[in-house]
Amino acid sequence: MEAYRLRGLGLAAAVLIAMAAWLAVPALASATNLTFEPYIIKSSLGKNTTHVAVGDLNRDGLSDIVAVNYTSGNASVFLGNGPGTFSGPLLAPVGATPKACVLYDMDGDGSLDLVVSVEYPNVITVLKGDGFGWFGAAKMYPTAHNEMLAVADLNGDGRPDIITVNDLIPGDVSVLLANTSGGFEAPQSHVAGPSPRSVAAADFDLDGSQDVVIAFEGKSNAGNVVQLWLGDGRGGLSQGGQWPGGTTPKSISTADFNNDGKPDFIVSSEGTDDVRLFLGDGAGQFTNSATVKVGTQPKFVLATDINLDGNVDAVAAGYISDDVAVMLGDGRGILGTPTFMKVGNGPKCVATADFNRDGRPDMVTADNDGSTIALLYSATSPPSPPGITDLGASPATFSPNADTYQDKTSISYTTNQSAYNTVAVYDRNGARLKTLKSSVLLPAGQQASFWDGKYTPSGGSTTYAPDGTYNVLVTVSDGAGNTAQASTPVIVDTAVSKIGVTYASFSPNGDGRRDTTTVAYTLKYAADVSVLIRDGSGAAVRTVKTASAQGTGSYTSVWDGRLDGGAVAPEGPYIAVVRAVNAVGTIESVKATTVDLTAPVVSNAAASPATFVPPATTLISYTSSEPGTASVSILNAAKATVRTLSLTVVSGANGFTWDGKDSQGAVVAPGAYSVRISINDVAQNKATVYPVVLSVTVSR
């Protein structure tokens, strides 16, 4: 960038715009392609990272990063190690609630120092850099309720001064002039109006003295404006004109956007999600030349030449949308359509430098909600565009009716590169019904999302989508905003609303007990219906009902446990399938059943003790090969039944206690008694060892 353009902007803008060039980067690369890799997150080890600054702290020619953390009251220092790698962070205390920071050589010793605006306890903190990547003890200068700050030489003595704004009523701009001892004088405060949020400096009227512009948040009638304050060259400021800054202007940055040698400014409007560029005439007046929509709640805007074409561009950080918007300048005061790139959670600031030493500016954001920084490295060559292959839904028709079968569909596809993935379901009118995945950064390869058929209508409660055809749209985009899309249809069909079988297990052995099972189902709509039986492998083994038209209502079909051809089905699991074909499509609903032809085996029957005297009891124990129900009879020596019991049986060890009483509750006469145990399993197969007899002697 030309020296003339930087000279008009002053120290504050030079800190932000010229830093990458100052860091001894390699020869400038071609400016035609604007591409960035997907972001890389690094923890700040602090809490609520609000602002970030870049510079060469240890004078090794590599870019370093400092981020301040609001809640933890410290600064995170990342030292560059080489192409895009960093050590740290190390934490330096700066004051309880830091809002913003600047790296600049404040004392002229050749090392970058750190200047921090601290909201509470209302101080400006200055940490002297040692030239080796660290800072000395913090010096704090009392001010007011600090927001943003800028650095510029307001009194022309060659030493950088500090300008900060505070939003306590009545709201002011404060100037801390550098003194000859390396410190700063007490602040000179000027009442500016309520809720000033950001400040930037440049020689806007070209009189050789630095001026400042201030963005005022719209918390009063005096808000939502940008004010110009003219410097007198001695450190004093006086109010000039003001211009509309949108709704809730948050951040302001200066540069020469139209290459006329006169500084301009750009302001972010949080309430209207845009940035507004104002071109200066060199006499302290400005004209709005461009307003560009960016991400949601842009809390920061930066003027910088991001594509190295010699024209100033703009980058805005969208706090709610978690992105940065890059707008290329045309050198005539117009900004292009923004390119959006995802970053971390809740970005509040963005800075640029060549971190990976490829000759192109990279970006770093301070991500407040994630307490991280996010790095976006420029791509040395344009990446191949993102691509989607093998997109499909399985099953393509599903029935979200809570029968545990085909209640959801899997959307699978393959991507050719790491990209941001969005998967959404649309109805036949093109309205978005459900977002399954929203801008999720995923590596290249097989991807999957699932839809359970549910959605939440506007103003309503979550419910199931009506039967019909829907479109699933998959969108993948890379860090440079290149996008690929593909879609696939899915069908929701709940024509069969209920399905059941009378017996989950049955025994088609001709003994008259559970020889068949009945498939019952209810149709919500008229359809051609068939009923099939599939074995455990999924193969169809019996057509219980051939396809025929049925209207709305409830129906049954009986399976006799036989296969097509008449043979009894082998033991094992089966699936009863109701297949309905209607105008929506073909849907199957299923219910499991089991063919069980094996009777349970009873073994290890014993009484302990075998002889007892009531009111003492005896424990009758036995083992069953499978669960079911037991019928127990206690017989006397004449084989007459004196007591009967019905018991639930588990697979394995079982037992019950006999108290020596008959069915009327009277103690039986002394003598020998036998116990007969008969078990029916769930399929009503009767125990083959019947009866099981053991002797119990009752004495007195």
Image (spheres, helix red, strand yellow):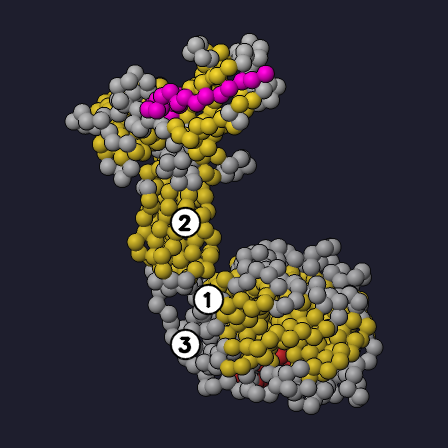
Tell which of 615 and 525 is nearer to you.
615
Q: x%, y% of residue 229?
A: 72, 72
Q: Residue 380: give its label.
A: 3
Q: Give the side of residue 370 with respect to residue 157, left or right.
A: left
Q: Earlier in the sequence, mark 3 or mark 2?
A: 3
Which structural element holds mark 2?
Answer: strand
Which amino acid, by three-letter code, is at mark 1? Pro
Which structural element holds mark 1?
Answer: loop
Where, by quadrant of the figure, is residue 442 drawn? bottom left
Magenta range is 678-700
Tell which of 478 and 199 is nearer to you.
478
Label 2 crowd bin: few (<14), some (14–19), many (20+), radius 10 Å: some
Kindly identify which residue carries mark 1. Answer: 38
Which amino acid, by three-letter code, is at mark 3? Thr
Kindly identify which residue carries mark 2. Answer: 449
Which structural element holds mark 3?
Answer: loop
